[in-house]
Amino acid sequence: MPASPPKLFSILIPARNEEGCVCSTVRDVAAKLSGRGIPHEILVINDGSTDQTSPLLHALAVELPVLRVLDKPAPHGIGLALIHGLDHMRGDAVAIMMADESDSPDDLVRYWDLLCEGHECVFGSRFITGGRVDDYPPLKWVLNRLLNNIIRLLFTVRLNDTTNAFKAYRREVIDGCRPLIAPHFNLLVELPLKAIVRGYTWTITPISWKNRTTGIAKLKMREMGSRYLFIILYVWLEKFFSRGDYRRPLS
C-alpha cells in the first residue's frame, strides 16, 4: 500500500559565510513552494559564519514566517550542521539544498510531487537525460564521475549522482538511517547509501545545477577523499556483512 502524502516539507540549507546568496536562495525557495501551495518550512543552519550571514537571516526571518534560523555552536562541519537541522525539523519530509543558488527550486517542487506519489526517497541526478550542469569545473567533474562510478560498481545501483547534496527523504527514512556519523560532506553520501542498503524505496529524477556566482565553495576534495572512502566502505560493510540487522522492519 503506497505511503500517504507528506503534510509538511522541511527544506534544510546549511550556510557558512554565505552572505552574498543565502537570502536570495531562501526567498526563491519560499516563493516557489508558496506559489504551488506546498506547506513548508525552511531551516537554515548557520554553521559558524563569521560574516553577515546570521544577522541577514534573522532579519529575513521577521519577514518570512516559514524561515527558521538555527545558529549551530561548534564543532562545525556541514554534516554536523545537517544532523542538527534534521534533529530540529518539524516536517514529515525533508530536502537538503545548498545556500549558493546552485540547486533549482523548480526541481524541489518535483521532489515534493514524487514524495506525494509514495516514494520514500527522491534522488536527483545531473547526469541523466534531462539533467543539466552549467559551468561545472572540469577537474571537479572528472573527480565526481570517477567517485560516482566507483559507488555504482560497489553497490550495484543505477544512481549515478550519489555525492550530490540535493536529495529528498521522508522522515521515517532519516530515522531509519540513524545513527548518522559523518561530520563533513561525506554525510551526503552516507544518507542515500544507507537508505538504499536499508531497503527504503527510491526514485531518480533529472535536475539542473549551476555554479555559484558569489562566495567560495566549501568542498575541498583533497581533504575529503579519505572521508568519502571511509563512509563508502562503512556502508558497504553494512550491506554485505551485517546480515540485514539494520534493514527497515517488514510491514
Image (cartoon, rainbow, N blue to C red):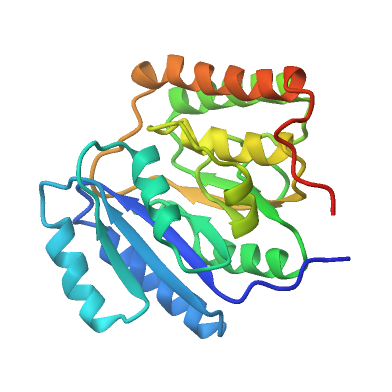
Percent position of residue 208, x then y: 56, 52
Q: Nearer the viewer, residue 45 or 173?
A: 173
Image point (58%, 20%), residue name? 234
Percent position of residue 23, x then y: 27, 66
Image point (18%, 45%), residue name? 48
Is 150 situated left or right of 95 in this image?
Answer: right
Residue 64 visible in the shown view: yes
193 up-or-down from 220: above or below: below
Residue 170 visible in the shown view: no
Is 36 situated left or right of 249 in this image?
Answer: left
Give the quadrant of the C terminus: bottom right
Image point (33%, 72%), residue name? 67
Image point (68%, 70%), residue name? 113
Give the quadrant of the N terminus: bottom right
Percent position of residue 189, x then y: 55, 33
Question: Looking at this rendering, what residue extends furthest in the right direction?
Answer: 1
99 up-or-down from 198: above or below: below
